[in-house]
Image (tube, helix red, strand yellow):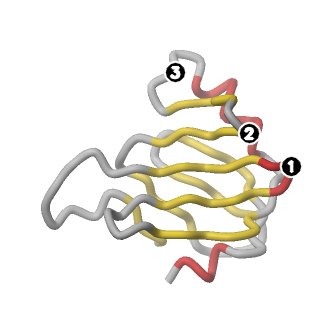
């Protein structure tokens, strides 16, 4: 399922998802997220200046996509950046999905 994201170039990060260049799908996100480089948090979903900080991922490429047993999604991007999407709920909800 997440294999379609590998090689995609990110055009935008919004609180509700990621857009990609030259593909018809998006990553819809309905849960908290954060973008990191090493131990540094570059942007988090609850930042008041989210829109400004989120531009850090524009133009980066998805290298890997991993899903944990609990439904967390981690995308490794170019420039040693990672996007972490982590469901903050229980039950049969779809906190993120490819649409």
Residue closest to the far front: 39
Residue closest to the far left: 91
Percent x, y of residue 94: 28, 64
The first of marks 3 and 2 along the sequence is 2
Gap between marks 2 and 1, in whole Å? 8 Å
Q: Which residue is mark 1?
A: 79
The first of marks 2 and 1 along the sequence is 2
Percent x, y of residue 68: 42, 67
Q: Quadrant of residue 60?
A: bottom right
Q: Residues within 10 Å of mark 2 (few under 14, many from 20)?
A: some
Which residue: 62% across, 81% down? 4
Gap between marks 1 and 3, in whole Å? 22 Å
Which residue: 54% across, 39% down? 34
89 left or right of 59? left
60 left or right of 84? right
67 left or right of 77? left
Q: Are marks 2 and 1 in contact (CB under 8 Å)?
A: yes
Q: Quadrant of residue 39?
A: top right
72 or 43: nearer the viewer: 72
Which residue: 73% across, 39% down? 37
Which residue: 61% across, 30% down? 43
- Secondary structure under the numbered disc 3 in the rendered image: loop
The first of marks 1 and 3 along the sequence is 3
Mark drawn on residue 17: none
- Secondary structure under the numbered disc 1 in the rendered image: helix
Q: Residues within 10 Å of mark 3 (few under 14, many from 20)?
A: few
Image vertical order of residue 49 relative to residue 20, above or below = above
- Residue depth check, mark 3 versus mark 2: number of the one nearer the observer: 2
Image vertical order of residue 58 relative to residue 5, above or below = above
- Residue depth check, mark 1 versus mark 3: number of the one nearer the observer: 1
Q: Which residue is mark 3?
A: 47
Q: Which residue is mark 2?
A: 37
């Amino acid at each position: 399922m997440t294999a379609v994201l590998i090689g995609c170039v990110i055009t935008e990060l919004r609180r509700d998802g990621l857009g990609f260049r030259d593909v018809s799908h998006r990553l819809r996100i309905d849960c908290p997220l954060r973008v990191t480089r090493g131990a540094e948090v570059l942007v988090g979903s609850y930042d008041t200046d989210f829109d400004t900080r989120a531009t850090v991922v524009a133009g980066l490429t998805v290298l890997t996509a991993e899903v944990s047993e609990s439904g967390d999604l981690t995308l490794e991007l170019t420039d040693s950046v990672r996007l972490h999407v982590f469901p903050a709920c229980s039950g049969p909800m779809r906190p993120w999905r490819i649409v």
